[in-house]
Image (cartoon, rainbow, N blue to C red):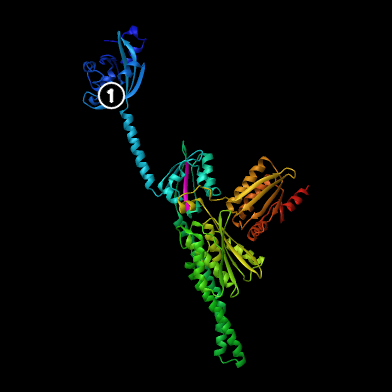
Amino acid sequence: MKLDKAAHPAGFEVLFYQNPQPMWIFDVHTLGVLEVNNAALVRYGYSRDEFLSKTIRELRPPEDAEFIDEILPQIRSTETNYREFRHLTQDGRILYAEIISYSINYNGVAARVVYARNVDEARELAGKLKLTQHRLLQILETTVIGFLQIDFDWTINYWNHAAEDLTGYYRDAVLGRKLWDVLPEIRHSNFYKYLHQTMEERHSIDFDDYFWPTQKWLVCNAYTTEEGIIIHFRDITRKRLAQENLLEKIDQLKEVSFLNSHALRKPIASLLGLTQLVSGDMITPQEFKQISALINECSIDLDNIVREINRRVGDEEYMQLLDIEASVFDFGNLVKDVVAKLQPLYKPTKIAISGITHQQFYGLRQSIEMALMYLIENAVRYSAQGSNIYIKTEIINQNIVLSVEDEGVGMDMEQLQNLFININRQKHVSATLGLPKINEVCRRHHGSMWIESIPGKGSEFFLRFPLSNVSAYKATGKTDFSVYHNATCDIGYNAGLDISILNWTGFQNYYTVRDGCLELIEILKKEPCSRVINNNSEVVGGWMDACDWVIDTLFPLAEQVGIKYVAWVYSPSTFSKLSAAYMLMKLNTSIVIEGFADQQSAEDWLSGLE
């Protein structure tokens, strides 16, 4: 029997019989199948007579019969119905199909046309996809490579187990949060620079950088997808430290070789010559007395040189970065332990703790302990017996600042400048150079070292260690991500005087100097201004690591945007002034630069220029 052409629009019969998807018509009262197309016969395996002898109950597994009875009233009362059913084939297999049915009049019988779309393949594909996703998730969760995914608005939506280990944060603390809210410690870093570059330019990038909150070197790869950025990273700290230790050993061997070949030659040659005079019976008793004194002097020189060689060989273990794995400890207790250990060794000198801060800190405990021991020993060496040495810790702008103050001979500006240059030597640092190595300990914690001294009154050495959100999280298991404070540079403009003003505060380094200066350059590209006040009056400590960048990159950019005059307001901090002096000494620019002690004097100078 064919469809009633008069009851249906032209072409319906073609759409029914030639449709590649199974279709049939059933009586809504008896549920018997009234008509079926060839695609249904092929799909379900029945002959035409077998299919037409079925009811829609019999096309389903027996256990689904009760469900069919429950939904029949809804099917009969709706014009169009959509749902998923299980169907039974001629050979007893179960198929899953999406059913769309709608009511028609079939030769005067109230009926429904059924359109059945097979979803077995879709279900199988979904199952395979789910299995693949599960296997991929297992790989991501067991690898040592950190893996995270962020949206284009920087929201973190995946954070694997390795990312937890490498950053210190469990995923529950970071999922759904903005990346830069979670890790404000790396706003001024290559991480920030390169990830923003990936986001803006939509291309992949490879780089490595130091993640100071956990004292780890990480190599990173970032690339964009349709959903955002995927970042994977791994720990290369041991490799980097091995390279640095090799360079340090080379430096040490060069130093020892120099001492052996040069410093030893003079006293040995002198001793040989003097002993020949004595053994040759060529001198008078008075001359013998004088020569004996010279022999004694040369012997002392030789002994000192041998001691120095032994120290430079032996100090490697003493001043090397002893621990490469950070841990949580009480900073105040570390200071008290060091003082208790050294006080009996240096009596009658008194090592007094003038201020103590009990702060949970995540860092390289042994390295900080060794640095403090060295500074105390150094203070004792340059102080009179029985004088005092004061140890203090305090928190300044969310930084632990440790200071060691003595009542010794102090240093003049020339001595401080020599120390400043020596301490800030870049690249690798020899294990035998005490103060540069201590500066390296601070640098590993994203901190710094500086010195204040007055000739004849003593010196004070400062070590700075920033607090981090990671440190707070590791110590307590929670953080509101507000522990770490970035150093700031506020950029203002005095419209009356037509002067741009940079106000630097706190502790600065290469990255903060670079980012603050580049922000000014971008402003001046849009709103040119030829006169600038660079106010360093609230800067503490040095920033020599930025000097070469300021010389090679900043001032050429400043000339291009039309800066002609810079009034430099110096910081009272000695190392900040020395950083500026070092930079200005090497600078070659057409920009006129003048130094001042306060901002008012700087404004007076600039306002008086034509």
**Image point (49%, 62%), residue name:** 333
Which span of residues is magenta-colored? 217-223
Query: Residue 495 lies in what quarter of the image?
Result: top right
Residue closest to the eye, 59 or 524: 59
Which element type, helix, strand or loop, lies under badge 1? helix
Q: Residue furthest top?
A: 6
Instruction: Please say whether residue 383 is one of the residues in the magenta stretch.
Output: no
Q: Which residue is mark 1?
A: 67
Please tell me how crowded label 1 is: few (under 14), some (14-19), or many (20+) other residues with Cα within 10 Å.
few
Residue closest to the eye, 93 or 558: 93
Residue 319 vs 128, above or below: the answer is below
Residue closest to the eye, 37 or 86: 86
Image coordinates of residue 470 in percent, x first then y, are: 48, 51
Image coordinates of residue 584 in percent, x first then y, are: 67, 56
Residue closest to the eye, 98 or 527: 98
Query: Residue 439 lies in what quarter of the image?
Result: bottom right
Q: Is residue 4 left or right of residue 373?
A: left
Q: Main secondary structure of the magenta part?
A: strand
Image coordinates of residue 59 in percent, x first then y, are: 25, 21
